[in-house]
Amino acid sequence: MNLKTLKTEQRNPLTEDIDALDTLSVVRLMNSEDRNVITAVGSQLEAIAKAVDIIAPALKSNHRLIYIGAGTSGRLGVLDASECPPTFGTNPSQILGLIAGGDHALRNAMEAVEDNRELGMDDLKGIHLTAEDVVVGIAASGRTPYVLGAVDYAKSIGCKTIGILCNDDAPLNNAVDIPIPLVVGPEVVTGSTRLKAGTAQKLVLNMLTTAAMIKNGKVFKNLMVDVQATNIKLVERKKLIVMDATGVERSVADEALKATDGNIKLAIVMLLGDATLSEAKKALEASQGNVREALKALI
């Protein structure tokens, strides 16, 4: 294995004396290097859009999105998956993050497990992967055996596969249906891919799920109309969303939410469509939960 062929493992000539700099110079240099992340992600927007156009219909049909990775890459997948239920009201079992070593690896370094191709395959078998699910392999290096084993298994059963990596010449690039190579260049600290590589991966994960949820009617205008109110702040946010979407006063939004048992979409459709609760429900059911389409049917 020649890690020096991977851009993520090469030394950054701009940071070779970073240990001799004062604190402000260190963070300035890190900030300057982070600008490369935006450029790298921007170069892959077409591939990201193709990935979204696979993920969105799969989720719409109640199939699953599976993130799988090791170390930082795996943790980022788990993070994105865990934030979808409260943000978009998804079923916790529909978007999953799998990490080499399981939940223990979320808080503890378990680097050795990433070298096991069979473990990646076994973890997907363990969740009963089907051909209708979508698998996203996340590996900064693009060569992690755990991820490659998982992707190979997913493809063998007819699953669509996406790869998020930070090298443009790595096995994962050729192993998936849609590769998303984010070439951010050598890290500020050589090989520390929790830095630029991790930031780039997080940005793409944000895009994949958020864009898919937008396409599936989980957002009206730019409002989270399926947000789950699990604390005082989010209960208040529900009222603000209804107010922002409709222009009504707080008391009116509060009454509408009470009438719909806290359902933001129903409240908005009732208020903007001048509809009864029953009419709003029928319109939303016909539009598969899309507020904009429901309103078109009523107005």
Image (spheres, rainbow, N blue to C red):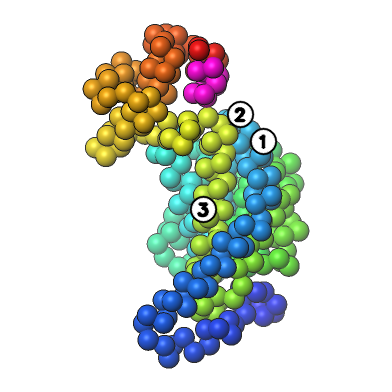
Q: Which residue is mark 1?
A: 132
Counting from the top left corner in percent of width and height, residue 185 is at 61, 72
At horizontal 70% and vertical 60% (from top left) the residue drawn is 172
Q: Is residue 147 visible?
A: no
Kind of residue indicated by mark 2: Ser
Q: Residues within 10 Å of mark 1 (few under 14, many from 20)?
A: some
Q: Nearer the viewer, residue 192 or 217?
A: 217
Residue 184, compared with residue 202, is above or below; it is: below
What segment is highlighted magenta in the picture?
A: 287-296
Q: Residues within 10 Å of mark 3 (few under 14, many from 20)?
A: many
The alpha-carbon separation of the residues under discs 1 and 3 comes to: 20 Å
For marks 2 and 3 on the same chain, the one whose residue lies earlier in the sequence: 2
For marks 1 and 3 on the same chain, the one whose residue lies earlier in the sequence: 3
Kind of residue indicated by mark 1: Glu
At horizontal 54% and vertical 36% (from top left) the residue drawn is 214
The image quadrant that residue 237 belongs to is: top left
Counting from the top left corner in percent of width and height, residue 141 is at 63, 68
The total number of labels drawn is: 3
The image quadrant that residue 7 belongs to is: bottom right
Q: Which residue is mark 3?
A: 77
The alpha-carbon separation of the residues under discs 2 and 1 comes to: 9 Å
Q: Nearer the viewer, residue 14 or 99?
A: 14
- Marks 1 & 3, CB-CB < 8 Å contact: no
Q: Which residue is mark 2?
A: 61
Counting from the top left corner in percent of width and height, residue 234 is at 30, 37
* Secondary element at tag 3: helix
